[in-house]
């Protein structure tokens, strides 16, 4: 059981080889953080059985009133709740805090009437496990999380 950054030791046919008009940025972003490896930007958890689970982008940061908070950090807390199947956290412009945060989650094995209670429990859980400022401003219960059109799942 170990968590860390997902890095690749060998090239593959579809990998990026540069950033248009900014090769230096490509080198600094993907090859410098872990010399000898390609840094994907993703966090990963490997079980004791050798299975890998992507935990989220390591560079998705929301700045809330000067506090830098990773979206994967909040999602990890939410996803450990037994009644949550999956979750996503996004930032949005906020007039006072700079950025606010919204949590969307898909419940599992609970009645539709219990979702409001679960949403409140998740806000409290985030406040306790991370900090009060990390609790989302909005919580949305959904039947499924929509895949981004540019994501590839293989």
Image (cartoon, rainbow, N blue to C red):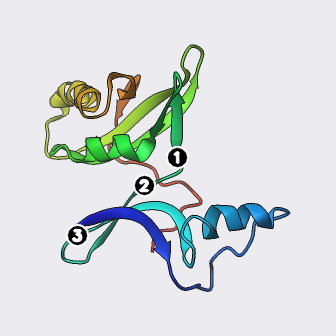
N-terminal of the pair, mark 3 or mark 2, is: 3
Q: The C terminus appears in which quarter of the rendering? A: bottom left
Circle 3 — which element? loop
Residue 112, placed above or below residue 54: above
- State which quadrant residue 6 falls in: bottom left
Residue 60 disc label: 1
Tag 1 and tag 2, C-beta contact below 8 Å: yes
CB atoms of marks 3 and 2 within 8 Å: no
**Residue at (17, 43) in percent of width and height:** 83
Distance from disc 3 to disc 2, alpha carbons, whole Å, reads 16 Å
Position above or below: 133 against 21:
above
Q: Quadrant of the N terminus?
A: bottom left
64 relative position to 150: left or right: left
Q: Residue at x 70, y 68 (%)?
A: 27
- Which residue in the protein does label 3 denote? 47
Q: Disc 1 versus disc 2: distance between alpha carbons? A: 8 Å
The residue closer to the viewer here, 109 or 88, is 88
Q: Nearer the viewer, residue 107 or 76?
A: 76
Q: What residue do we see at 54% from left, 18% from top? A: 97
Q: Secondary structure at mark 2?
A: strand
Which residue bears the numbered disc 2?
56
Q: Residue furthest right?
A: 21
Mark 1 Cα shell of 10 Å, populated few (<14), some (14-19), many (≥20): some
Q: Position of residue 149 (x, y in %)?
A: 57, 57
Q: Are marks 3 and 1 in contact (CB under 8 Å)?
A: no
Residue situated furthest front in the rendering: 35
Question: Residue farthest to the top?
Answer: 96
Question: Is residue 4 or residue 145 the one in the foreground?
Answer: 4
Query: In the displayed structure, does residue 18 sit left or right of residue 72?
Result: right
* Label 1: which secondary element: loop
Give the CA separation, mark 3 to mark 1: 24 Å
């Amino acid at each position: 059981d170990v968590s860390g950054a997902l890095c690749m030791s060998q090239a593959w046919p579809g990998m990026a080889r540069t950033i248009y008009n900014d090769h230096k940025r490509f080198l600094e972003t993907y090859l410098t953080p872990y010399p000898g490896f390609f840094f994907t930007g993703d966090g990963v958890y490997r079980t004791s059985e050798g299975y890998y689970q992507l935990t989220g982008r390591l560079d998705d940061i929301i700045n809330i009133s000067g506090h830098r908070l990773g979206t994967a950090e909040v999602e990890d807390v939410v996803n450990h709740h037994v009644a949550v199947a999956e979750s996503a956290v996004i930032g949005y412009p906020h007039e006072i805090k700079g950025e606010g945060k919204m949590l969307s989650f898909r419940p599992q094995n609970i009645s539709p009437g219990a979702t409001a209670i679960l949403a409140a429990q998740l806000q409290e859980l985030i406040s306790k496990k991370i900090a009060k400022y990390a609790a989302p401003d909005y919580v949305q219960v959904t039947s499924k999380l929509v895949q981004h059109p540019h994501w590839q799942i293989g």
